[in-house]
Image (spheres, rainbow, N blue to C red):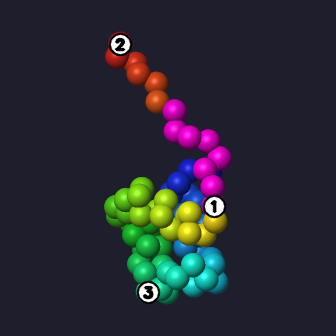
């Protein structure tokens, strides 16, 4: 799953969010942001995912098409 999907899954788990120190009103705001496609930085999502103990399964790979 990608970063956004993992973050959404985390936010939907209230107990885990509280365990890692995310306030419930913050969790609910993130869920709302995700529903209406508002911006949450990748850095912020990754910060919370790391606190929750998740690890990166595969690094991002970029392919340059214009060379």
Q: Locate residue 16, reporting x and y percent.
A: 63, 78
Instruction: Give, as a single range, the part of the protein colored magenta.
Output: 54-61
Q: Which residue is mark 1?
A: 54
Identify the image quadrant of residue 36: bottom left
- Residue drawn at (38%, 63%) of the image: 40
Q: Locate residue 2, reporting x and y percent.
A: 56, 50
Q: Is residue 58 magenta?
A: yes
Q: Nearer the viewer, residue 24 or 20?
A: 20
User: Spatial distance from mark 3 to mark 1, Cα to Cα?
Assistant: 22 Å
Q: Residues within 10 Å of mark 1 (few under 14, many from 20)?
A: few
Label 2's element? Answer: loop
- Which mark's residue is nearer the viewer, 2 or 1? 1
Q: Which mark is residue 25?
A: 3
Q: Earlier in the sequence, mark 3 or mark 2?
A: 3
Q: Earlier in the sequence, mark 2 or mark 1?
A: 1
Q: Locate residue 58, reporting x and y percent.
A: 62, 42
Q: Earlier in the sequence, mark 3 or mark 1?
A: 3
Q: Nearer the viewer, residue 64 or 35?
A: 64
Is residue 66 left or right of 47 when viewed as pictured?
Answer: left
Q: Is residue 41 magenta?
A: no
Residue 61 to residue 4: above or below: above
Residue 59 to residue 41: above or below: above
Q: Which residue is mark 2?
A: 67
Residue 11 to residue 25: above or below: above
- Residue drawn at (61%, 50%) of the image: 56
């Amino acid at each position: 799953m990608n970063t956004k999907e993992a973050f959404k899954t985390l936010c939907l788990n209230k107990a885990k969010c509280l365990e890692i120190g995310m306030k419930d009103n913050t969790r609910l705001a993130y869920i709302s942001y995700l529903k209406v496609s508002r911006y949450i930085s990748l850095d912020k999502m990754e910060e919370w995912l790391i606190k929750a103990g998740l690890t990166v399964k595969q690094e991002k790979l970029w392919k340059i098409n214009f060379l």
